[in-house]
Image (cartoon, rainbow, N blue to C red):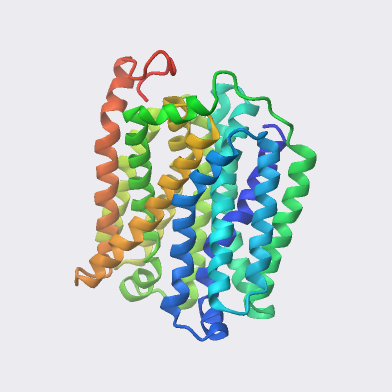
Amino acid sequence: MPLAIPVLGIAIFSLNTTEIMVAGLLPSLSSEFGVSVGTVGLLISVYALGMVVGGPVLTVALLRLPRKMSLLGLLAVFVAGQVLGATAQEFWVLVVARVITALAASAFFGIAMAVSAQLVEPERRGRALSTLFAGLMTAHVVGLPAATLIDQHFGWRASFWAVAALAALSALAVARLVPRTPAEEGIDVRTEIGAFRNRRLWVAYGTNALIIGAIMAANSYFSPIFVDVTGFSPGTVPWLFGLFGVGTIIGNLVMGRFSDRYMMPMLGWGFAATAAVLAAFALVAEHQGPTLVAVALLGLIGLPLSPVLSTRVIKIANPGPLVNTVNASAINVGVVLGPWAGGQAIDAGLGTVSPLWIGCGMALAALAAVLPAVLASRQGRPTSPAKVTAQKGV
């Protein structure tokens, strides 16, 4: 891998830490601004909405600029938004800061994927994207706990300042180590926008939202499942989340290594395995040993499918920044949809483990959507126009 790709992965680590760290700062923010924990939770929803809607719009505005310039500009905007949040004296200012950082993060993620795809040969794009997603997944294992720990010792503002400092250092590394990439041959503004006429691209986006939603439907309610159903002590919960997180990092490295060669089989078997593990987890959730196995397996095969999903999007359309930013938006739709559906199931009286069944259903829906392409790839039939790509079964 070119050194520029892990540098971009570190930047994504800092950007994604900002997205999720509010979950660990809820009590402190509630106390600071005199609002309910539920109101503070809106900061998570606002961030997701900014990524889903605002990121693609901002990316369109940047399409004609050199990509390295865009990356540096977005990091500057992100740092400014993070500083605004760290110094906020009113809750609405913090909301504005979250919107600013979300816009910058979404566009940065899409452009970083485009740059990474351009820096390596087409047959190594899956591995390059897995390096970027490693930054995203490490944020769950390291970023969130670290932000929470900083909050407990130095206050929530210190957590915001720490992420701002890391993002600023990432900008320096990007300026020094990420090369200027020429415009990708055959890809311009018209080509990027024209890709959205491809129905299969939207099917891929929908599939990505479903499978990520399946994982998040379960992951968002791990704590009550672990404590109220399985019988683990509350002090054990962080270690169980750590088990899941370590699994995602290992799975991401493995899947990224083979996603270029075995993309469609990995998606088919991965979706099926995710559904099976979620169903098994729901059935054995009252037993601690099997629960540990289910959590580890879900970490290995769930979120690590992300680079494979993104590789498929690139092969269907193109490796341009707009296609990738909308893919990031689709993933964030899943991040919002899964927890919402799981919460609705619990509120409807279906039980604490019902989010696992919701996740299983979403994974099966994703499998049904991708199955025709998987079968076509096994039979060697091309499913994409020759004008776009000669890939088969995508």
> Residue 194 location, x and y as percent?
43, 27
Q: Which of 274 and 382 is in front in this view?
A: 382
| Residue 14 picture quarter | bottom right
On screen, residue 231 versus residue 69, left or right, reads left
Q: Relative to residue 369, is residue 377 depicted above or below?
A: above
- Farthest-out residue, left: 349
On screen, residue 268 versus residue 93, left or right, reads left
Give the residue at x 40% y 70%: 223
> Residue 263 location, x and y as percent?
42, 29
Residue 262 visible in the shown view:
no
> Residue 341 location, x and y as percent?
28, 60
Q: Relative to residue 183, is residue 268 depicted above or below?
A: below
Give the residue at x 36% y 28%: 197
| Residue 2 picture quarter | top right
> Residue 17 location, x and y as percent?
58, 59
Quadrant position of the N terminus in the picture: top right
On screen, residue 186 versus residue 345, left or right, reads right
Quadrant position of the C terminus in the picture: top left
Give the residue at x 19% y 72%: 349
On screen, residue 26 versus residue 217, left or right, reads right
Give the residue at x 46% y 57%: 48
Q: Which of 250 and 17 is in front in this view?
A: 17
Counting labels gives 0
Q: Nearer the viewer, residue 290 or 51?
A: 51
Residue 360 visible in the shown view:
yes
